[in-house]
Amino acid sequence: MRYPKVYDVIVIGGGHAGTEAALAAARMGCQTLLLTHNIETLGQMSCNPAIGGIGKSHLVKEIDAMGGAMALATDKGGIQFRVLNGSKGPAVRATRAQADRVLYKAAVRSILENQANLDIFQQAADDLIVEGDTVKGVISQTGIHFSATSVVLTTGTFLGGTIHIGLENYRGGRAGDPPSIALAHRLRELPLRVGRLKTGTPPRIDAKSVDFSVMTEQPGDTPTPVMSYLGNAEMHPKQISCWITHTNEKTHDIIRSGLDRSPMYTGVIEGVGPRYCPSIEDKIHRFADKLSHQIFIEPEGLTTHELYPNGISTSLPFDVQIQLVRSMKGLENAHIIRPGYAIEYDYFNPQDLQHTLETKVIKNLFFAGQINGTTGYEEAGAQGLLAGINAGLRAQDKEGWYPTRDQAYLGVLVDDLITLGTKEPYRMFTSRAEYRLLLREDNADARLTEIGRKLGLVDDVRWRVFSEKQEAIAQQTQRMKETFIHPQTELAQRFTEMTGQELARENNLLDLLKRPQVSFEQLASLTEAHVAPEVGEQIEISAKYSGYIDRQQEEVARLRQSEEMVMPPDFDYDRVQGLSNEVRAKLKAIKPATLAQAGRISGVTPAAVSLLMIYLKKSG
Ligand code: FAD
């Protein structure tokens, strides 16, 4: 049957990438269909019910700055909020929230259901309609033909998914959900490079069987942080604590004794797992000299006794899982509600994608999320947003858009993926960004909201809040430039009492704010200025780090020159003399879009970049 409505964009998969993709396309005014296995699992957190953390909250705030759902859903579902790296510089500060998985999912679903231009349909997509080199639509499990200009695939861990617990295994997309087998077969027919990756999750524990009195309590921060630029602490449900326990030598002995029945250590699992989120068996093996690991005991929600023991992801046999859990303090009588498991799934080499996340070989087909070799909700959501935008732009017959590395972590993420590819699940870190001081979690709105507005992603409410904040920053900055404190006045005396700083000559407030010992809050109270904390924060960071920020901006300006040197897709590398065969082969395989991207390909030397530049200048 041919479905009567023709869509601009079809998104397959209602996980973190799929929901952001569908919402973005629909916000842009595109008629959008979200086709997913099960409406009850929209926005489901497959693993840890937590959003944000270092590098990841930066992505969440970028999604938010462009009108996405993840940060608002976190504010509505978050039950413990903390700012990580609070004592370090603003570039690496990160907000993290433990979420009630039921509330989070409900928030995502409500945003989806209330989005104009968006239809949701529950059914598996089994096939793509491809004519020539262009995708034209999707065929569902029961043979319904859906037509669209663009299709976004966000199938997560489901393609050819196999679940492992010890040496037992079965097909599944994640525990309790079917795998995507027909679509996996279909995709393997396309000229795209496919591989296998793996990820794992810990057993879940019944809180009624846990002795919290011997664990360390970890409450959230006060005042409670918020995730969205539109969020506030009143949106949050009741806040509760997490707990900390530890593995010990007995735990490690139990794990070692089970390795002969581990699917990872007996070669049953071939896919590579996430280096930075390793299983407990991996940790014991890799850090053999460590006698103990910290385990965070995190509640899964306000209406359940289920606990997530963060740090013991495992695919060891169930009998070993029981012993290892019960060897830890406070968990001696623990009841496991769900066993831990590993999952292997197909992913596609992201080097076969363009910066817009469109595949290089099939026009109008976009990939986002775990299918591109990443791990994590935030990485998935950010890619979903980008793929949704570009699928929408294509349907509107407009030029594609993507952020550069100095504009957004999303720019870093996509550029890393398509330039370097990935052989193991890729996750975001602040260390992956060259311009960390420019890409802070606190200024994602300043970097992206205006662009989002132009693309049609940002509604009037967000735009008003954003514009008022930027105006207040500009006004306050000007006021501080024009307000002077003169030595030997009453104000100067109060300034010294408050900050311990002497005033040798007259200074304006902005210059005083550059001093490490002086805070915006102090100056505001001194001059009785009533300024919103988020406005003060921006002025303070700009003042204190102005030297470093200026230097990074100069670097960016230099880089932009080579970013602007475009390499056409049909660029003939054989005509550039002096390139080694190895470099030539890499350039031909990756087909960088700009000279700057060519320089980021591993193995492409600065000398090779110079040769390319000379050639481009001569021929251009
Ligand atoms: P998913 O969230 O997997 O969503 C995919 C969606 O697509 C689902 O709704 C599914 O039903 C739907 N779908 C799939 N195929 C079809 C089809 N043919 N037709 C219709 N709908 C379809 N991340 C970490 O950061 N750290 C971890 O330690 C970690 N451990 C994990 C452990 C396990 C066992 C699993 C399953 C995941 C783990 N993750 C972890 C990964 C995290 O869940 C993903 O990164 C994230 O969910 C990816 O989002 P996504 O939108 O790409 O895919």
Image (cartoon, helix red, strand yellow):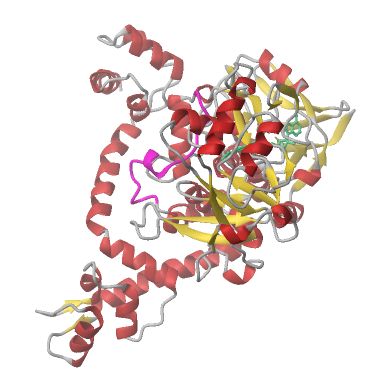
From the viewer's perspective, is 46 left or right of 439? right
Compared with 161, 306 (above or below) is: below
Q: Is residue 428 above or below residue 443?
A: above
The number of numbered badges drawn on the structure is 0
Q: Quadrant of the N terminus?
A: top right
Pick out the residue farthest to the bottom. Answer: 490
Residue 36 image offset from top left, x and y in percent: 77, 37
Give percent across and percent down for residue 527.
31, 85
Query: Residue at left 26%, top 42%?
Result: 555
Query: Which quarter is ligand 1 in?
Result: top right
Q: Is residue 3 visible?
A: yes
Point out residue 489 in the picture as x, y percentages from the top left corner.
Answer: 16, 91
Work out whether residue 73 or residue 308 is closer to the camera in this orientation and state it. 308
Q: Up-down: is 18 above or below 542?
A: above
Q: Is residue 378 left or right of residue 617?
A: right
Q: Is residue 597 above or below residue 534?
A: above
Magenta residue check for 436: yes
Main SS of residues in magenta:
loop
Q: Quadrant of residue 30?
A: top right
**Image quarter for residue 389?**
top right
Relative to the observer, which residue lies in front, 569 or 424?
424
Q: Position of residue 269 (x, y in %)?
A: 62, 20
Residue, x 61% and y 33% (percent of image)? 314
Which quarter of the image is occupied by the C terminus? top left
Query: Could you tell me if residue 446 is visible in this image?
Result: no
Q: Give the magenta part as a residue range.
A: 423-439
